[in-house]
Amino acid sequence: MIKGTTKSTFLLLAFLTFSLNASAQASSGASNYLLYGLVGAIGLLLLIAILMVAENMLHIEAKQMGVDKSGANYSIFPNRDEIYKGKSGSLPTGSSVTALKRGHDIKLAGAAEKVVDAATAGTTFALQPQNFVGISPIPKVTVEKGNEVKAGDPLFFDKKNPSVIYCSPVSGEVMEVRRGEKRSIKEIVILADKEMQYRTYDLPDLATCKREDLVEFLLGSGVWPMIRQRPFDMVADFNIIPSKIFISTFDTAPLAPDNSFIVEGQGAAFQKGLDVLNKLGTKVHLGVSATGASSAFTGAQGVEINYFSGPHPVGNVGVQMHHTSPIDVKDPAWVLGVQEVLTIGKLFTEGKFDASRIVALTGDELETPKYVRTYQGANVGELVKGNLKNDGARLVAGDVLSGKQVAADGFLNFFDDQLTTLEEGNEYEMFGWLLPLSPRPSVSKTYPNFLFPDLKFKANTNTHGEKRAFVVTGQYEKVLPMDILPQHLMKAILVNDFERMEGLGIYELSEEDIALCEFVCTSKQPLQKILREGLETMREQA
């Protein structure tokens, strides 16, 4: 790149010099203005050439040293982030912001009003083994129909890894152990008590206990499955000491819950959860929004705080890891959500397994989008009862990009903190995309969405087209703020090219990271499904 730039610049300089001499010989008595102008232009071009060579040399040196992905600006020119940092008074002194430009914010109608409804908790809850990557399809169930359990009592464990206990989120009666295909355990359903009863624990002294004793306690208490390990998003391996633990404190997915609102009044429990994690790993990284966050996040102690700004998916923990400390199969990382940290913290501050969750009920199909206080695995039909505008609305456990459709008698998944409602797209649109008659979320300039940046859309489930040939479009790279070629990776997965999958960065990705790529995909490819198949293939080979 340097050779090409330098060659072009000096050819232009030679041409200008020749023109200058010719001009001087042709009209020696003419005005000197032209002469001065040409000399100035030559000087300016020389300066630009020197700066471009210096800029390229800095980038090459940073790449050779392996620090080009550290988030620092290796350039002779300040970037927007550095200029912003100098003018911002909201960040602590010495803080820097990783400002990402690639991505896209999908603005939908139906954001949850910031009021917590504690009267819509529900009465039935379920723990679903399939929520945990790598677990046996038929784990060892330790309860049966009719048993009484307390919150925190064991329900099942994985036969391949019996040390990790999966516990009941509520107290009550075991209603049913439902089975799926090939007699796999689909879910264990519990009818909750009106007054919650909690299992009692002999808490270790966090200040004096050894790490191995703490790990043993967490394994038996029921909170260990809340810690996931990247790559693969599997339950964390308790035999390793991770070099990094990541927590993203904000979510930029459509209609995502506001974690700063959720953590209000629970700062002590959150800090205690961080203290526990500090005892488990080498370093805890906290990803915080640069545009405003709770003091429970910005004032957290004993962690490395990294500030981020930009469009979705900047709030994804995978994106934050990529720009802070990329992971590898030989150097895995542990990840948690804010409410998982709160549960771990409350185990030590209150001495009980508190699996309560503040869940955002969102979407334009609700009469009143709101936050509700409930527990893990709540029945979705009970959460939206009497609050739907249309009984035919689609229910999505999670956000519209990476969530999963769930029936009205189904349950939230283990890590869900959002329930989204969507209008079913079961009516054909005349002329389809050829004549767009209604506004819709899109990144295409065909629609004048960019002229109305604050407009919020009412989305439905129409895909506006069928699956097509998987062609190279360059769309994915525009919305994925990572140094990864997602389209090449997807094709490597489809042909089971293990070396290419690994070289193209499959270990850094999870389904939520490429959900936006799936949204913009002209070919209508199920990218999240393809990625999970690739991750499972690599996990089996590891």
Image: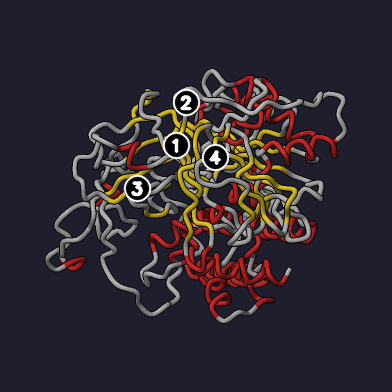
Question: What residue is disc 4 on?
Answer: 147
- Rendered residue at 55%/47% (across/down): 144
Question: What residue is disc 2 on?
Answer: 261
In depth, the one of 74 and 359 nearer the eye is 359
Q: Rounded to the nearest whole Å, what is the CA distance between mark 2 and mark 1?
A: 29 Å
Q: Rounded to the nearest whole Å, what is the CA distance between mark 3 and mark 2?
A: 29 Å
Amino acid type, residue under disc 4 in the picture: Asn
- Rendered residue at 58%/77% (across/down): 492
Please state the horizontal and vertical placement of residue 16, each as a whole percent of the image. 55, 67
Among the two numbered marks 1 and 3 on one chain, the one whose residue lies closer to the N terminus: 1
Among the two numbered marks 4 and 1 on one chain, the one whose residue lies closer to the N terminus: 4
- Rendered residue at 34%/56% (across/down): 443
Of the two numbered discs 1 and 3 in the rendering, the one whose residue sits closer to the viewer: 1
Secondary structure state at the residue bearing disc 1: strand
| Residue 479 visible somewhere in the drawing | yes
Amino acid type, residue under disc 1 in the picture: Leu
Among the two numbered marks 3 and 4 on one chain, the one whose residue lies closer to the N terminus: 4
Among the two numbered marks 3 and 2 on one chain, the one whose residue lies closer to the N terminus: 2
Q: Do the CB atoms of the residues marked 4 and 2 lie less than 8 Å apart?
A: no
Q: Do the CB atoms of the residues marked 1 and 3 lie less than 8 Å apart?
A: no
Q: Rounded to the nearest whole Å, what is the CA distance between mark 1 and mark 3?
A: 14 Å
In depth, the one of 242 and 516 nearer the eye is 242
Amino acid type, residue under disc 2 in the picture: Phe
Secondary structure state at the residue bearing disc 2: helix
Question: What residue is disc 3 on?
Answer: 409
Q: Tell me how many marks there are.
A: 4
Question: What residue is disc 1 on?
Answer: 191
- Looking at the image, residue 69 sits to the left or right of residue 132; the answer is right
Please state the horizontal and vertical placement of residue 159, each as a whole percent of the image. 70, 58
Q: Rounded to the nearest whole Å, what is the CA distance between mark 3 and mark 4?
A: 22 Å
